[in-house]
Amino acid sequence: MRKIVVFTGAGMSADSGIKTFRDTDGLWENHAVEDVATPEAWVRNPGLVLDFYNARRKQMHEVEPNKGHYALVELEKYFDVQIITQNVDNLHERAGSSHVLHLHGELGKVRSTRDPNLIYTPDHWEIKLGDVAEDGSQLRPHIVWFGEQVPMFETAIDITQTADIMIIVGTSLLVYPAASLIGYVAPDATVILIDPKAEPPSGRNIEIIRGTAAVELPVLIHKLITNENKKKYA
Ligand code: NAD
């Protein structure tokens, strides 16, 4: 089976009703990222940070995967599919995708502030000041904040290098190091970018589809499956 690596950003979940980050004037749900999504914000005002992620977690349980998420599940019948997502929601998993790597962490998980290996999956959306891990330290969101290391980045590079086709969906390609992944795609691999405001990164041949994930991803995936079947039965 040929390998398709799908690299998704906030635009992938926009059609499910979760706002992107850049489309709202650089604010994330009315907050400046430096107030809610940095290690400094956590030190300054952990209550605000917990409230912000509680609201995101609550919303995640209220929304549903969209047609783009489901089309990626269908693709698995014909290709070896690996998703690398910058999203912290769980919509790829809830749609049924089998292989999802979260580069920036997961809203559904929390962890000890002292020991990054103490990770939990609470069955409720609200985490309060005073909720502690088994080592007695405050629980924090299991999220890679701006300015923190991206522990899964090396794994993401290894996966990207194996792609025959890379599909990039709904990302402004502005958040690093995630955006630099594209530089690790093999020179002979096909790269396709779906985004209503797609700006092709320079230095490589990329097929651009200007449109939304819920509309354009099912169309593209139908084409890829049809072509793959033609090859198989030719
Ligand atoms: P971004 O907000 O910087 O860019 C979003 C991109 O999505 C834009 O290029 C926009 O044109 C495109 N877009 C908007 N609507 C779309 C649609 N319907 N279909 C396809 N594309 C659409 O997002 P980013 O590049 O992923 O970086 C933002 C960071 O913020 C990420 O690291 C992520 O962790 C975090 N974030 C996550 C979520 C989530 O988990 N759902 C939501 C907001 C922000």
Image (cartoon, helix red, strand yellow):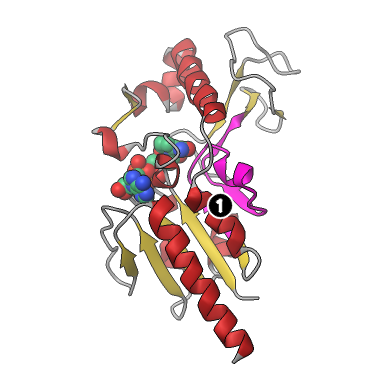
Q: Position of residue 20 (x, y in %)?
A: 36, 38
Magenta stretch: give its range. 82-108
List the single residue furthest toward the left: 25
Q: Quadrant of ligand 1?
A: top left
Residue 91, by quadrant, is top right
Q: Position of residue 168 (x, y in %)?
A: 42, 59
Vertical position of residue 98 compared to residue 20: above or below? below
**Mark 1 residue crowding within 10 angstroms, few (<14) / some (14–19) / many (20+):** some
Residue 154, by quadrant, is bottom right
- Mark 1 belongs to which amino acid? Tyr
Foreground residue, 5 or 13? 13
Residue that appears at 58% across and 15% down = 126
Q: Position of residue 172 (x, y in %)?
A: 32, 49
Residue that appears at 67% across and 53% down = 98
Q: Is residue 151 magenta?
A: no
Left or right for 100, reference 41? right
Q: Which residue is mark 1?
A: 70
Task: Count the labels in the image.
Answer: 1
